[in-house]
Image (tube, rainbow, N blue to C red):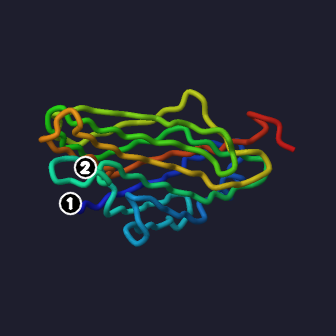
Amino acid sequence: MSLRKAFFFSSVFLFASPALAQNARIEAFTYAGSGCPVGTAAGVISPDQKALTIIFDQFEAQAGPGTARAANRSFCQLAVDLRFDPGWQVALFDATYRGFADLEPSVHALHETSYYFSGSPLTSGPVTWSMIGPFTNNFSRTDNFATMVWSECGTVRPLNIKTSLYVTNRMAPLHSGVLTNDTTDVQVSIQYGLAYRRCP
């Protein structure tokens, strides 16, 4: 099954100073994983560098008779390079995923995502969501974080978003199921660093 998937990365900036907000931008991104091998995804950064759209072609997991065990799991990790003025921090506060699941009775699907900044021991997640068949429909889910993980003061490092899909028919070996990640809407809040912690 070949489906086109879209990952939408949008930034919402909440500042005390609009002038500084203009300097916050997405510069580049990379991707890797079993769900997004090299050459199976394409991305475009918007002209104002505030949004990133990536189209995936292979981000799905499936299970069933005749399906290789390796197909049960799939993951994709994005590294998004952000640039913003010193004295500011960035934190992920919301992520919405939309996709499709076709699960026969007793087939189990799991969607899991972790968020972190390169070099930081702090992680938001893993945030998990699961369903058990029978189910055939589109789905939408939102990750909300009770505690936001902020980037370090005085440094700008990539924001990493790792999403994993898992489908198993262990409880019903003769049944099949598939889980896809079609679209993802991610919002980032950038606010003056001194409002949250003292930066050098």
The disc placed on residue 22 is none
Q: Residues within 10 Å of mark 2 (few under 14, many from 20)?
A: many
Circle 1 — which element?
A: loop
22 with respect to 171 (left or right): right
According to the picture, the residue beneath numbered tag 2 turns out to be 62
| Along the line of sight, the residue nearer the viewer: 64 or 3 | 64
Q: Nearer the viewer, residue 69 or 154?
A: 69
Against 39, residue 189 (above or below) is above
Q: In which quarter of the image is residue 141?
A: top left
* Foreground of the two, 51 or 128: 128
Verify CB contact (< 8 Å) between mark 1 and mark 2. Answer: yes
Residue 159 picture location, percent across and down = 60, 51
Q: Identity of the amino acid at label 2?
A: Gln
Image coordinates for residue 128, horizontal then vertical, percent: 42, 34
Q: Which residue is drawn at 16% across and 53% down?
A: 66
Residue 164 rendering spot, x and y as whole percentages: 41, 46
- In whole angstroms, how far apart are the C-alphas of marks 1 and 2? 10 Å
Image location of residue 5, percent across then percent down: 32, 58
The total number of labels drawn is: 2
Q: Is residue 166 above or below residue 39?
A: above
- The image quadrant of residue 121 is top right
What residue is rendered at 62% in x and 42% in y?
A: 91
Residue in view at x 29 percent, y 61 percent: 4
Three-letter code, disc 1: Met
Q: Residue furthest left?
A: 174
Above or below residue 36? Residue 64 is: above
Q: What element carries label 2?
A: strand
Farthest residue in the top direction? 146
Horizontally, residue 196 falls left or right of residue 22, namely right
Quarter of the image for the N terminus: give it. Answer: bottom left
The residue beneath circle 1 is 1
